[in-house]
Image: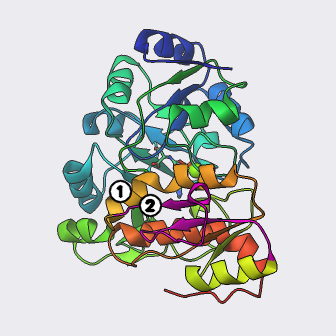
């Protein structure tokens, strides 16, 4: 198992030696390696079992460092960086040649962000290179929001995990780039679209399509538990599975169900806060996935603010199960 700690010197040593380190951010934990070292980047893909067509995000400590590896900063994207970095925003920018093609899967743009986590910012400031870091989970599974999640799944493959506590936002960054001269959102995430629009005006959102290979985070089935995961009207689904005598667990927004054992249900936010729900979502999915049940039943949250990104993750978590269970009426949003 990996060492878990807060020793920045040790983390920096491993990274400088071409090793990978689990790294906290405000969104989810990353699996970090030297972004300019093709061997370290290869290790990231292998460790995650990630297909090489799915490019990585490069993390740096300051907007002024971006031009070390980016050709130019389109004006509207720069405005967003100035306003929201450090924070849950990733920008797609034209890459310089020093970024290995492996990082971008051969694309001309590189995904860049400055994460909002003090420990990781200190690490990035002391390193002479930026860090490539996808979420620190096996490809397709739920993203980690605690050091122990990283250790559970990748602990035997990496030497060190920097422990920065539970992630404050809990959803991956919002990915934004230019498409046909227009600011475009490619993945909904921890920064709400309306905040982006308050700076650059109306933007295009392409995050719901499943076929566009520009951002494989758009893959239809992703962020998925190993158990079947169904979304619909919780009361009627609960009744149905009780009648069928199939053991199930419940992931609810705020409602508590008296007919379901306490240990078999999680409320994302009893107060109905979407921020709190986002922060709890992935840990709750992991907890329910580890129970001795055959299926996880869930529901969509209000489709506003962060609720849009949460619903996007729920929908992807359910993609395969819903395709195979026509029995369940899908509540659309
Ligand atoms: O919050 C986050 O973004 C976290 C933390 C660790 O920073 N990282 C993360 O990385 O979610 P990952 O690898 O799980 O998701 C990155 C997404 C992928 O869907 C990838 O396809 C997309 O970013 N991406 C990366 N480079 C791209 C590019 N040049 N063009 C389009 N999409 C890109
Ligand atoms: Mg990921």
How many callouts does the rendering have? 2
- The location of residue 273, given as percent across then percent down, is 31, 64
Mark 2 neighbour class, 10 Å CA radius: few under 14, some 14 to 19, many 20 or more: many
Q: Which quadrant would residue 44 be assigned to in this image?
A: top right
Q: Which residue is mark 1?
A: 276
| Magenta region includes residue 266 | yes
What whole-number distance in Å separates the C-alpha atoms at marks 2 and 1? 7 Å
- The location of residue 206, given as percent across then percent down, is 48, 75
Q: Marks 1 and 2: in contact by CB < 8 Å?
A: yes
Label 1 CB-ligand 1 distance < 8 A:
no
Q: Which residues are magenta?
A: 245-270
Quick one: 329 or 160, which is closer to the camera?
Answer: 329
| Magenta region includes residue 191 | no
Quick one: 1 or 91, which is closer to the camera?
Answer: 1
Q: Which residue is mark 2?
A: 268
Mark 1 neighbour class, 10 Å CA radius: few under 14, some 14 to 19, many 20 or more: some
């Amino acid at each position: 198992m990996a060492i878990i700690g807060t020793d920045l010197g040790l983390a920096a040593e491993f990274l400088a030696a071409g090793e990978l380190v689990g790294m906290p951010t405000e969104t989810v934990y990353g699996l970090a390696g030297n972004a300019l070292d093709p061997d370290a980047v290869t290790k990231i893909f292998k460790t995650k079992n990630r297909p090489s067509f799915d490019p990585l995000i490069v993390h740096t400590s300051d907007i002024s460092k971006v031009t070390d590896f980016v050709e130019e900063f389109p004006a509207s994207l720069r405005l967003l960086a100035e306003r929201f970095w450090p924070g849950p925003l990733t920008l797609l920018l034209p890459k310089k040649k020093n970024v290995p093609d492996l990082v971008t899967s051969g694309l001309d743009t590189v995904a860049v962000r400055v994460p909002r986590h003090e420990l990781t910012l200190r690490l990035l400031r002391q390193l002479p290179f930026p860090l490539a870091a996808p979420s620190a989970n096996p490809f397709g599974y739920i993203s980690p929001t605690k050091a122990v999640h990283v250790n559970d799944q990748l602990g035997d493959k990496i030497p060190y995990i920097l422990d920065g506590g539970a992630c404050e936002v809990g959803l991956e960054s919002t990915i934004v780039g230019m498409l046909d001269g227009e600011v475009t959102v490619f993945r909904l995430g921890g920064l709400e679209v309306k905040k982006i629009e308050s700076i650059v005006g109306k933007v295009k959102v392409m995050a719901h399509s499943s076929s566009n290979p520009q951002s494989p985070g758009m893959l239809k089935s992703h962020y998925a538990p190993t158990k079947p995961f169904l979304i619909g009207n919780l009361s009627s689904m609960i009744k149905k599975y009780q009648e069928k005598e199939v053991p199930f667990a419940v992931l609810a927004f705020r409602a508590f169900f008296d007919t379901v054992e306490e240990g078999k249900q999680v409320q994302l936010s009893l107060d109905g806060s979407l921020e709190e729900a986002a922060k709890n979502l992935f840990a709750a999915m992991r907890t329910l996935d580890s129970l001795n049940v055959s299926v996880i039943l869930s529901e969509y949250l209000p489709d506003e603010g962060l609720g849009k990104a949460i619903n996007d993750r729920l929908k992807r978590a359910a993609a395969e199960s819903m395709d195979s269970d026509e029995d369940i009426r899908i509540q659309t949003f």
